[in-house]
Image: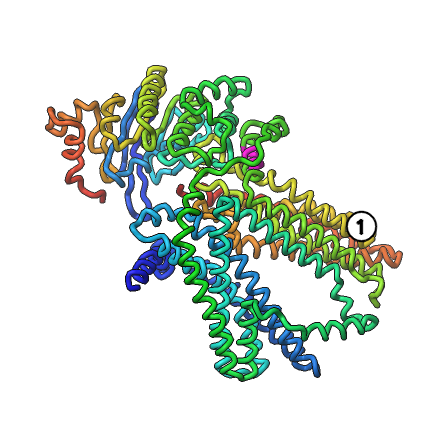
Amino acid sequence: MIELTQLTKIYNGFTAVDRLSLRVDRGEIFGFIGPNGAGKTTTIKMLGGVLAPTAGSVVVGGIDLQAEPERAKRKIGFIPDRPYLYEKLTGLEFLRFTADIYGVPVSEFQPKATASLEKFALADWSNELIESYSHGMKQRLIMAAAVLHDPEVLIVDEPMVGLDPLAIIMVKKLFRQLAADGVTIFMSTHTLKIAEDICDRIGIISRGRLIANGTAADLRREANATEADLEQVFLNLTANVPAPE
Amino acid sequence: MNGLFADIGMLLRPRLLPVLRRGRSRRSRGGTTRLAMLGAVGAAFWCGLFVASWRVLRYFKGIEDIGDILAFKLLSMILIVCFALLLFSSILTCLSTLYLSRDLLLVHSSPVPAHRIFLARWIDSAADSGWMVILFTLPVFLAYGIVFAAGPGYYAATLLSLIVLAAIASALSALAVMAGVMLVPAGRMRSIVVILGVLLFVTLYLAIRLSRPEQLVNPEVFDTVMAYVASLQAPVSPLLPSTWAYDSIQSALAGFTARSFFHTALGASFAVTLICVLTLAADALYFKGFSRTQTASVRLVRRDGISERLFRFLPGPARSFTVKEIKTFLRDQTQWSQLFLIAALVVIYIYNFAALPLERSPIQTAYLQNLFSFLNMALALFVLTAVTARFAYPAVSLEREAFWLVKTSPVPLRTFLRIKFFIYYLPLLVLTEVLIVATNLLLQVTPFMMALSTVTVFFTVPGIVAMGIGLGAAFPDFKAENPAQTVTSFGGLVFMIACALYIGVVVLLEAGPVYRIFMADLHGRDLPVAVWLWAAAAFGAAFTLSLLAIVLSLRFGEKRLSKVHI
């Protein structure tokens, strides 16, 4: 469903992502972890079509994101790490804005929006301006908007930042449910526990390179730390990674 | 005391370092050209102001008996206007720096007493609001010094007086803002101040305009002029800080150094007293006011759904962006003041044409009316440029950091820019056509001139709006605290210059053939074929230029915007 081939991003001579090749299948939850500045957000932005790669390609549902960006983006739901929104719209208006952009039929909008607002505990706030929402509420609203058009792929950058424990549990359940329904989820996170809990596969990126990729058990084997928790595995794998040429 | 200065210095350092390090960082090195261009425009404006002031003062000096009185009256008026400008800009800057800046949360979490935070922010705000007013009034004072052959003491006294005036204005504003924020949330207070400022300006302008000052040069009302001269010598209130600055500068001009120093010291002692009062008030009020600013604002109007119903006929993406644009515009109270300003501008503009004393002109009225009509076309397009600069140019930057929504959406940037273009094109076209038609009716122009101006405007407006959207997209600033002010940036300057050139070329292309056609019409002569061909070529070139302005600007904006990192 997602195929990254030799994906590279260079900013002013600095290689942020270095020849990243990866494949994520339909209905799979892929966790992308790595230290700060490793290239996670850059990769996520290239996947979401926000950033053009310097080299390589991103194919989503068989569509090349650079060749046919609009067609590919229709299949994607994007959730950034920072919830910047149109602050002068209400929650419901923002959902309608998103629905119109992604071509959700007018007749389907109201029931979908109502259900989504209920699910994300925003129903009572739907007619308030977004500027009065808390960080967590904005994050939940972005999630509600991202799944409104039934995307085939969900790209998520740090999904749990700013969410309360109840919302975290709800989001974990939602992701599992979406994956069971065939949605592919590509998720970056710093929280190793969350990656271990919900991801089918985990990729570790360091200094722009994918240094490990597999299930939690695979990673433990690779790091020669079969009994250790994922944090130790992460530390073992990311230590002494050479800088890109 | 040492602790106080150390804390203030520490708090000011993050604001000073970026200024001091400008040019050293990788990103700003590319901006040398921009800085040079902005500097050149600033220098040209500064020099122009100096030359204009010097000529006016030389003219005054040449008038016997009342020349000096006029020059000093002008000085007093300049200082009052300066003080009013400083007060107004200080209120807005104080609100932003003391209550609305994004870094305030971090600053208030630091272990520094509230009054020290306040003082550091106030110094920052005073410098921010005062430097431009001082810098751009200096050429006027320089002209005074030269025309009155003043000594070096005059320049020192002037600079000191202006700095003291800026400090007093900023301190008074900070006190007013501190008290105001306890009653009204800071965000809303800024809107109220801007609206009041605009209303005050418009009222003052209309009051002056309705008093018909141009009649003062009419010999028939000479008695009134004498009365006016007598009123020139009427004293200004001695309680106004601008009067102390005036007394100081005027004494220095006349060579009375000790008297000048006394008046400067009077102002300075008042400024110091105000700062002490400010510090005490800040301890009691500043943090409370800041806390109040953190609470969410309440919606004033809750009637919704009109725009959705109105634009139901549009396709999905176009409808979503149009509705979003209209709603965010109407809910942003800072935009309301701009609407007031435009309404006032239209009234003033049309009134000026109604007040033109054409019947007293020695030149043939029909010729003059149509000449004005032609020039009016250019003038209306310049007004449109200013309005476009305020509304259409910042349209892309107003997406702010939510621009990721556009980038990730399945809507191409080209479509996004076209939607923005049409949102602004239609109202701006109506505005300009209203200006042109109303003023032409007042001028009683020929049907040919009426048709020419309405058609020219119809084809030129989209070019200017497209340049606004395109160049705004090419030079966006998604992180600006006030995106509406992005027009003062390098991109805004490029937009202004491009529009001036565009309007100039269109007017030049049309001027020749229009003159020939109009004169032939006036004298009832037939036009030679060559003139018709010339006219066709000129209008064709103007039309092509407008098409190019639309296509090239939007393409340029799209190309640059696609490379922007968010």
Q: Residue furthest right?
A: B524
Viewer-side residue, A138 vs B417? A138
Viewer-side residue, A140 vs A134? A134
Residue B138 place in picture, x, y as percent = 52, 71
| Secondary structure at numbered mark 1 | helix
Q: Is residue B138 magenta?
A: no
Extent of the magenta region? B321-327
Vertically, is A66 above or below B64? above
Vertically, is A150 above or below B53? above
Quadrant for the C terminus of chain B in the image: top left
What residue type is disc 1 on? Answer: Leu
Viewer-side residue, A175 vs A70? A175
- Categorize mark 1 by other alpha carbons within 10 Å: few (<14), some (14-19), many (20+): some
> Is residue B33 visible in this depiction of the protein?
no
Q: How is the image coloured?
A: rainbow
- Of helix, strand and loop, which mostly describes the magenta segment? helix
Residue A151 place in picture, x, y as percent = 41, 22
Q: Residue furthest top?
A: A181
Q: Which residue is mark 1?
A: B441
Q: Is residue B326 magenta?
A: yes
Vertically, is B328 above or below B447? above
Q: Chain of mark 1?
A: B
Residue at image location 57% in from the left, 61% down from the top: B84
Viewer-side residue, A87 vs A181? A87
Residue B241 place in picture, x, y as percent = 54, 68
Residue at image location 43% in from the left, 46% down from the top: B479
Q: Is residue B14 left or right of residue B172?
A: left
Q: Is residue A157 left or right of residue A86?
A: left
